[in-house]
Amino acid sequence: MTTPTRPLASEEIYGEKWNRCVTDTIVKTASGLALGIVFSAVLFRRRPWPVFLGTGIGLGMGYGNCQNEFRSPYVPGQVSKLATLRGHLSPKPSSN
């Protein structure tokens, strides 16, 4: 049996967006830091600026993605009524 999906409360949607935002920012910052360390060690004779540059780029990308996430009116994982009405997505068949 399938359980009916209940609509998400606005607090839950906001919390999910924050969780995705923080996780994405941490991953991008850590990736930038790692790439900065590699480039610093391999190409730039252990200078510190590639580490700072990579970390800053990662933070900036995470921040930019967070801004886009919070400005977006769409909730990932849920089909909007407008997309269903326009025929882009077919509604789930009901089992009667």
Image: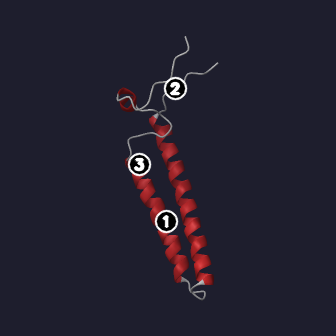
Q: Is residue 44 above or below residue 24?
A: below
> Residue 17: x percent and y percent?
49, 46
**Local crowd at mark 3 within 10 Å, few (<14), some, or many (≥20)?**
few
Taking the image as shown, residue 1 lies to the left or right of residue 6, namely right
Q: Is residue 72 above or below residue 41?
A: above
The earlier-in-sequence mark between 3 and 2 is 2
Give the labeled residue for mark 2. 6
- Asked whether 40 or 83 is in front, the reply is 83
Between marks 1 and 2, how big is the CA–CA gap?
Answer: 35 Å
Per the image, label 1 sits on a secondary structure element best described as helix
Mark 2: which amino acid? Arg
Mark 1: which amino acid? Leu
- Asked whether 78 or 13 is in front, the reply is 78
Please tell me the numbered disc located at residue 31: none
Please tell me the numbered disc located at residue 59: 1
Residue at 52% from the left image edge and 73% from the top image edge: 54
Residue at 56% from the left image edge and 60% from the top image edge: 26
> Residue 78: x percent and y percent?
48, 34
- Numbered circles on residues, count: 3
Taking the image as shown, residue 43 lies to the left or right of residue 83, namely right
Between marks 3 and 2, how big is the CA–CA gap?
Answer: 22 Å
Q: Residue furthest top?
A: 96
Mark 3: which amino acid? Phe
Per the image, label 3 sits on a secondary structure element best described as helix
